[in-house]
Amino acid sequence: MNNANIHPTAIIADGAKIAEGVRIGPYSIVGSQVELGPGVELISHVCIEGKTTIGANCRIFPFASIGHQPQDLKYHGEESILQIGDNCIIRENVTINPGTEGGGMRTIIGNDCLFMANSHVAHDCKVGNNVILANSVGLAGHAIVDDFVTFGGLCVVYQFVHVGAHAFVGAHSMVDGDIIPFGMALGNRAKLAGLNLVGLKRRNFSREDIQTLRTAYRMIFSSEGNFRERVSDAAKIYKDNPLVQEVVGFINAAKGRTICMPRNGSNGN
């Protein structure tokens, strides 16, 4: 435990790997298979178990429960994995579960994520970089969240749902369909409400790129004609635009799963 600062009331099991500069606060518990990267800080009353890896410079706040048994009745004690990247902030009462045999044995979280109080990441989820879960957001098992997605408070995401990069999900939304990259979804059940223009501007997408995305969005989600034909048309018209192609590729990859649509749109199947 190189230069680790460990409070005398903390319990560190034999076998735990504690890197340089780790700080472990009062009444925290670290299991025997846990690995804490350089500069990790457990403020106090944090409990980490299982085959869990926490990346460098993460901060975990009181009463977070990380790496404990998944809330899946099919789980039968398999030694699955939870992997959390660097520079993540995990606030009070957050719960993050490892994978299961039925989902690839691994829950993965990227770098620079913020999990606000009472949020939950279930078994076998894949969460990208720079993702924000506001207070009491819940990701059900097998959900996939790409980079730079932001969730407002009290959202719920169904099992196996895929949320594309740079999307925004408004507070109190119930998400039961895939959300396209750059999209904004609101409501119960969540519906597309346009593009995440605020997020695109904050991340310095050019005005030209934003305008092209808006034009393509209007084409794809028009209320006229067949949805799949409109997607195909957009792929051809904007064949040289990587952002539109990202949206088209995302929709095509859904392979029959429901796509979150505008309220005047079809069901996306």
Image (tube, rainbow, N blue to C red):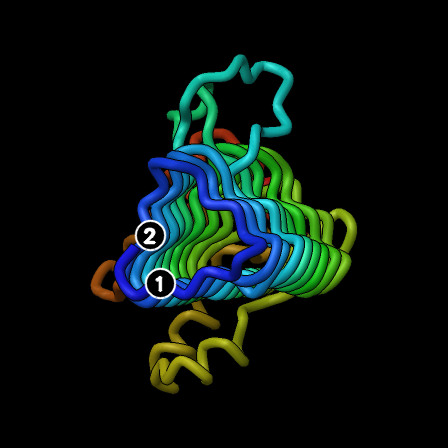
Of residues 121 and 128, the one nearer the viewer is 121
In the foreground, 136 or 241: 136
Q: Residue at x 66, y 60 (%)?
A: 92
Q: Is residue 245 visible?
A: no
Residue 136: x, y in percent?
72, 56
- Quadrant, the N terminus: bottom left
Report which quarter residue 215 is drawn in. bottom left
Q: Residue at x 47, y 72 (%)?
A: 214
Using a 10 Å C-alpha cutoff, classify the residue at mark 1 as few (fewer than 14 neighbours), some (14 to 19) or many (20 or more): some
User: Residue type at mark 1?
Assistant: Ala
Location of residue 266 in the rendering, given as x and y in whole percent from the top left corner: 63, 43
Secondary-structure class at tag 2: strand
Residue 197 image point, x, y percent: 52, 77
Whole-number angstrom distance, CA of label 2 to CA of label 1:
7 Å
User: On the image, which quarter does residue 150 sit in?
Assistant: bottom right
Looking at the image, the residue that sits furthest to the left is: 240
Q: Which residue is mark 1?
A: 4
In the image, 57 versus 193, the foreground residue is 57
Mark 2 belongs to which amino acid? Answer: Ile
* 183 left or right of 236 in image: right
In the rendered structure, which disc, 2 or 1, sits on the residue that comes first in sequence?
Answer: 1
Tell me whether circle 2 and circle 1 mark residues in contact (CB < 8 Å): yes
